[in-house]
Image (cartoon, coloured by chain):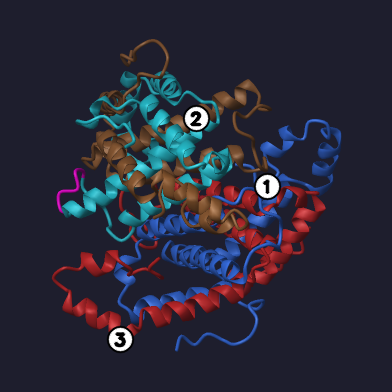
Chain colours: A cyan, B brown, C blue, D red
Amino acid sequence: MTGVPEGEGGSVTLDMLKQIMAQFAKERDWERFHSPRNLLLALVGEVGELSEIFQWKGEVPKGLPDWKEEEKVHLGEELSDVLLYLVRLSDMCGVDLGKAALRKVELNAIKYPAAKVCKEMKEDSEIPAAPINNGSGIEGD
Amino acid sequence: MTGVPEGEGGSVTLDMLKQIMAQFAKERDWERFHSPRNLLLALVGEVGELSEIFQWKGEVPKGLPDWKEEEKVHLGEELSDVLLYLVRLSDMCGVDLGKAALRKVELNAIKYPAAKVCKEMKEDSEIPAAPINNGSGIEGD
Amino acid sequence: MTGVPEGEGGSVTLDMLKQIMAQFAKERDWERFHSPRNLLLALVGEVGELSEIFQWKGEVPKGLPDWKEEEKVHLGEELSDVLLYLVRLSDMCGVDLGKAALRKVELNAIKYPAAKVCKEMKEDSEIPAAPINNGSGIEGD
Amino acid sequence: MTGVPEGEGGSVTLDMLKQIMAQFAKERDWERFHSPRNLLLALVGEVGELSEIFQWKGEVPKGLPDWKEEEKVHLGEELSDVLLYLVRLSDMCGVDLGKAALRKVELNAIKYPAAKVCKEMKEDSEIPAAPINNGSGIEGD
């Protein structure tokens, strides 16, 4: 119905999702509701639903070994909702999300050079909290 | 350095971003910090930064016609940060995000059939707030 | 049952809410779930539900003149959920929220002196976006 | 300068904070920016900053025994920012937050009767994840 291709998700491009979302909104006459701030708040709503899945679980190991299949399916749906609104928000803001993401990765690579970061980590190994807390993610702020 | 391909972002796949993020974390020895809940909170932090861009602006028209180029670049960076953490979180949870997104689109198409939605909208045209508020997004809940 | 006092909410103190929440958790043996990060994610979940109320509405005037009574009641519930988790999170972190809030107000008053801000606003009156976007809220960053 | 009373925070009422915020906005001519959705997005921004404090820490014990004093002060500031925007948002929506919070506590007490919850917990003691995940917080959804 939506012209979604078969198969695994590995080849799914951001552009493909953008087009699917655009067509989806057009067919339902929802374009008028898809203003940037409406979509942003919808995105926040979905992040809330994603958080609810994890809220009473305490720390959760990678790969979610103890989760039931239905919990994982539900998680996939909430992750997808965040993604779909993010793609639609980017589109409505005129931002090429794929291009922006590649550029951000490059910026992060410059900001956190692999060699330097590892060296700092080693030197600070007895006080691991300090460097971690101030920027051991994808980016600082 | 990061092996990012040249060109526009249209052909960027979720799988490509997943691999870039995995390599990025590995090179910096950040894998130990990338637990699901750490990444989720980092995602929430980035959604906060995205919201800050829009917070004092009142309603914003599609395409952001009045925004300066530097504001749009900044927006692209924050949208990307949300995407990159979302991709990484999905990977650390063992969720194939592209596959899940395509499946979610199908579910949404079933939940909100194009013809039916348009008909309801027409019938409720004098009270547009009611049906909109209860699910005219990508999904209800 | 919960020992909540009668009357209007004007005299409700943060300390009163803290004690109510502590008793509530104790009576249900929920204290073991109320770790800081569990509560933080629950708070994010409630902020998501709050956002959902506003997501498809476009700009909304102060006082919500066009909202139905039941919508306002629902809004009050979601605002309350955010507050209650915030109070509980503060308590579980050993933070005196009322004291911290008063201190933050003082810091904001120093950071944004009333006279200076008004003068800057007047001078920048033809480019209102600049000063607004970088700090016309309660605080800057 | 802001007329904030001296002493501990235990006696701080929501009404007091509401009045401080109203005066603060008025003195800086910020009332025009304090529309409901602007304030909501500002709130989301602050929740993001709060999350950043916890994002790379893994599970954190109650009372934050290993945190430095400056980290706790910073945490108090971010918790306060969320509270202050929440109070201001409620005011701009015409919601009596204190009253709404007391009412919500009563609703929660009815929804999760202390005796019944404890009994269920005991019966489900070998599968604690199930009942917890579906509503062992302040409220369900």
What residue type is disc 3 on?
Ala
Front residue of D131/C92: it is D131
Looking at the image, residue B73 sits to the left or right of residue D132; the answer is right
Q: Which residue is mark 3?
A: D115
Q: Quadrant of residue B73?
A: top right
User: Residue A18: x percent and y percent?
Assistant: 42, 30
Q: Tell me the SS state at disc 1.
A: loop
Which is closer to the viewer, label 1 or label 3?
3
User: Residue D88: x percent and y percent?
Assistant: 66, 59
Front residue of B117/A61: it is B117
Looking at the image, residue A73 sits to the left or right of residue D75; the answer is left
For the question of whether residue B62 can be seen, the reply is yes
Q: Which residue is mark 1?
A: C137
Q: Quadrant of residue B102?
A: top left
Q: Tell me the SS state at disc 3.
A: helix
What residue type is disc 1 on?
Gly
> Which residue is pictured at 56% across the width and 38% down the height?
A36
A107 lies above or below C20: above
Magenta range: A62-66
Q: Tell me the SS state at disc 2.
A: helix
For the question of whether residue B39 can be seen, the reply is no
Q: Chain of mark 2?
A: A
User: Residue A24: x percent and y percent?
Assistant: 42, 37
What residue type is disc 2 on?
Asp
Figure quadrant of the N terminus of chain C: bottom left
Q: Chain of mark 1?
A: C
User: Residue C131: x percent and y percent?
Assistant: 73, 36
Which is closer to the viewer, label 2 or label 1?
2
